[in-house]
Image: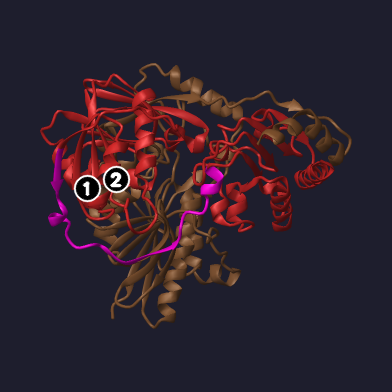
Amino acid sequence: MSAMRILAYFRVTPDYEALRESEWAAGAARSTSAADGSNAMGEPNAPSGVDTRYVRRILNCFDESALELALRLSNALVRLGSAADLGALSVGAPDAEPHLKTLLALGFERAARVHAEAALDFAPALSAALIAAYTQRIDHSDLLVMGARSGPGDGGTVPFRVAEQLGWPCLTQVTEVEPLAEGRLRVTLMTEDGLQRLTARTPCVLAVGNAVVSHLRVPTLTDRLAVKDKQPFVMEPADLGVDLVDAVRRQATILTALEGIDWRRESILIAGDTPRTKAQALFDSRLKNLLEKL
Amino acid sequence: MRFTAVVDGTADRAADGPPGGARRQAAALGAFLRAGLTGAAGGDTLVFYHDEREKDRLVALAPTRDIRLVRTGLRRFERMAALLSAQAEGGQTHLFLFAGGPAGTELATRMACRSGGEVLTDVLNAETAPDRLSCRRSIYSGHLMGRFELSVRPWCVSVDPSWADSDESEAIEHVVLSDTDETGGDGPEPFADRELLEAPSSGDLAGSRFVVVAGSGAGSRGGVEHIAEAARRLGATFGVTRPVAMSAWAPMDRLIGMSGARTAPALCIVAGASGAPAFYWGIEKAGLIVAVDVDAHAPIVREADLVLLDDAVAVLEELAAIVAAEREAR
């Protein structure tokens, strides 16, 4: 029986929670003062967009779940006596390289990056075109696993765009996946009707949502040493038949401006010496009346 | 510029199972049409349905006078997208509106891909012009609002889930313009053996009048459990932030924020959460927000009405004891 070829896609993003508030405000101000007003993001990160160059890079949280679920699926297939062939793909800047090395150490057999800078930040159609082209033309995968949302645009459209290009079905908000016989999978997903389980047949796209499995395992030093000579494979969009410059120019959905969001409230400090006195002051001043009405 | 609002009522079944999401979808689309969309010159609603017995109820929910009914299989999004794409071709309608959530995202995206149009999801408001659509939506995990312009038509737009907050509705005299059965072209079902494991369990958060939220400032699973116990004693519904759910310190169905529940309680006590925008989105409609945190510089301090700078677990335990004593004394 042929091995199930699993491809896990991920993105590395800046840790937005670590960015100073002043930088968000500055990014918004720069965007509205951009001279031509054609694209708020300008060229990579500056001058008219939000400058995220100085914050650490993290795995997008849904993608991290997707990577761990793909590893577990691959392990489960092997336990069942089937074969699995696991690969990883990232599209973006070289920030992804350390994560790709980690995945090789964890047992991923292939790790690839399609080189593209911030041009992809608000261009889900471009990300999808690159992912679909790699899946179909280079990897010949049977199953694509990825996070349901990723990147600063965070629209959740990429898995469906890829599925449309590949002509595959797609399940979203996936929380668990287990192997069955003959290339079939038992998939658990959160739907608007509640938590459901169903049988999916490969090929298909699985977009991972709020999975309980949320952390990627950590490789041991021995794991890392075993793959120290293995390097991720880097490709250019042109290698996949995508002219990135032209595709960016032809985009029909453009981000034109950024605006700050003001969520400030009164912020009245309840004073006291101990947790007890503060809780009492809160209760006496506001909660007593309010709780009676609830 | 005319629009078509799309409601997926295929999962609404009269006899078996829980009602599908058509009521929520229709409410969100209705609220968006009243307050979120400008420049459109009227439109209609396309309702997908599966169960004949649900038809009258689905018609009554529709947010426009004119309705077109289309019968398809249960949640057959690819089929629906193909039918919508055929509708858009050569038609007078260039704007297709979908409710927020995974189903709306899938339908809007698949339709845009098939019709050669553009898709934008979770839209807060939109303004039409003959050759473009301007939209606002939150970006960078809720840190900023982005303004987008869509040029190539049809425009497939899903509205932000916050539009479903509205429980207002208009009394509309509905007119059913057409009713077609497209179940014949459904093709083979891509997924089999569908079983419902659990009904939606976070619904108690959405409707709660009093919510207590634990953030990672609780420090440990034990700390979160203490806050959950205090919430129970206070009579509040318990929720958590994403880092707490990701650490498995509380079940995933307690998650509040962009990837979880959206709440609108009269009172919300936030215990040990920094106030990241993706979380705050889930409580922004709260009447009174009380923040308990040791960090005076955390965003939640500015975003709350009342602030207690102290250990979240200790304050919540004291508060629960005070309220319990007060109730006993009465």
Q: According to the colouring, which chain is brown? A: A
Q: Nearer the viewer, residue A236 or A149?
A: A149
Instruction: Judge left or right: residue B329 versus residue A251.
Output: right
Q: Quadrant of residue B289?
A: top right
Q: Is residue B87 visible?
A: yes
Q: Nearer the viewer, residue B15 or B279?
A: B15
Residue A89: tell me if it is visible: no
Is there CB contact under 8 Å for labels 1 and 2?
A: yes
First to last magenta residue range: B178-206
Above-or-below relation of B211 to B302: below
Q: Residue furthest front?
A: B330
Residue at the image point whose x is 73% and y is 38% from the top = B292
Q: Position of residue B142 (x, y in %)?
A: 51, 35
Q: Of helix, strand and loop, which one carries label 1?
A: helix
User: In terms of image quadrants, where is residue B139?
Assistant: top left
Decide which of tag 1 and tag 2 comes sooner along the chain.
2
Q: As shown in the figure, which amino acid type bears the numbered disc 1?
A: Met
Look at mark 2 in the image and give the residue it sits on: B8
Residue at the disc numbered 1:
B80
